[in-house]
Amino acid sequence: MGTLPMFHPSVLARAQQDAVWDRTTAHNKLRSHLREYVPGFLAAFPARAGIMRPVARAVLAAAPTPAAAAKLTLTQLRGLLKKAGRSRGIDTEATRLRNAFRAQQMRQPPLVEDAMGRQTLALLGQLNAACTAADDLEHAVTQSFNQHPDAGIITSFPGLGPLTGARVLAEIGDDRSRFSDAKGLKAYAGAAPITRASGKTRSVTHRRVKNNRLNDAGYTWAFSALTASPGARAHYDRRKDAGDRHAAAQRNLFGRLLGCLHHCLIIGQHYDETIAFPASTKLPTAA
C-alpha cells in the first residue's frame, strides 16, 4: 500500500488536545479559587466539571460574589439560563439555584469578597477563552478528519469517534511503513508491557517512556470500547478475572485494539467484531 497524503489534521488534533488541557487547568484554578470564598456556588453545581458548563459560567459572570448571587431573582435566573442555552426545566432550575445561593455558608469579609470576585471574573475570562478555543478546534478537527482516506476505517472501531480517531491518527501518522509490525506500534503507544528477567527473578511492568498523547487517546478509546463492543468488554473481564487490575486490563485492551487497527490500516479493511474478538480466544497469562 502506497503512502497516503500527509495528514494535515494532525496539527489541529494536537492543538485541540492542548486546548483541552488548558481548559482543564483554567477550570481547576477557578474551582480552587471559588472554594476559598464562595463554596455555595460549587454546591449549586456539584458535578466534577460543573462550573465548566455554560449555565454555571453565565451565572458566575453575573454574580461573582455570594452577596450578588443571593440577590438574584427568579426572573434574572431564568434569563441567565435561557441565555446559556437551557430550554427545559427552567423554572425548576431557577428555583433550585435561588435556594442554593441564599443558603447559609461560610463568608469572607465584604471587602475581601469584592476583591476575590474581581479575581473570579479574571479567571472566568481565561476559562471562557479556553472553552471557546477547545470547541472551535474540535469542530475544525472533525471536519478535517472526515476528509481523510482512513477516516472510515478508524471510526469503524468501537469507541473511536472523529475526535479521538483524529488524535490517534495524528500520532501514528499515515505512513504505513513507519511501524513494521503491530508490536512496534504498541510499544510506541505504551500498550506493550516490558519484561525484565535476571536469574530466577522476572517482572512485567508497563512502559513509562511512550507517546503520551497517543497513550492518553488510547485510554479514552479503550474506556469507550467497553460499552460499545461486547468483545472488548469480554476481553477486559477475562483480563480482570486472570488477576489484572483495572489499569493493566484496560491497557491490554488498548493494545489489542491498536493491533487490530494496525492490521486494518495496512490491508484497508474495516473493523469486524467477530475477527477482532473471536469467541474461542484464550486468555494468556496475566501480567
Image (cartoon, helix red, strand yellow):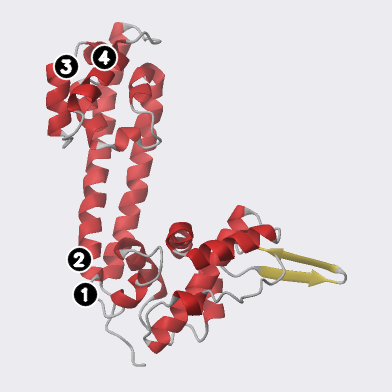
- Residue 118 in the image: x percent, y percent? 24, 22
Residue 147, disc: 1
- The alpha-carbon separation of the residues under discs 1 and 4 comes to 50 Å
Answer with the quarter of the image where residue 14 lies: bottom left
Q: Earlier in the sequence, mark 4 or mark 3?
A: 3
Q: Earlier in the sequence, mark 2 or mark 4?
A: 4
Residue at image x 40%, y 88%? 267
Of tags 4 and 3, the one toward the viewer is 3
Residue 229, visible in the rendered structure = yes
Asked if labels 4 and 1 touch by Cβ distance under 8 angstroms, the answer is no
* Residue found at the far front of this picture: 279
Q: Earlier in the sequence, mark 1 or mark 4?
A: 4
Asked if labels 1 and 2 touch by Cβ distance under 8 angstroms, the answer is yes
Residue at image x 34%, y 54%? 18
Please give left or right for residue 108 compared with residue 84 in the image.
Answer: right
Label 3: which residue? 74
Q: Amino acid at mark 3?
A: Leu
Label 4: which residue? 114
| Mark 2 crowd level (few <14, some 14–19, many ≥20, 10 Å Cα) | some
Residue 143, disc: 2
- Residue 197 in the image: x percent, y percent? 79, 71
Of tags 1 and 4, the one toward the viewer is 1
- Residue 282 in the image: x percent, y percent? 66, 74
Q: Earlier in the sequence, mark 1 or mark 3?
A: 3
- The alpha-carbon separation of the residues under discs 2 and 4 comes to 44 Å
Q: Amino acid at mark 4?
A: Asp
- The alpha-carbon separation of the residues under discs 4 and 3 comes to 23 Å
- The alpha-carbon separation of the residues under discs 2 and 3 comes to 40 Å
Q: Is residue 158 above or below residue 75?
A: below
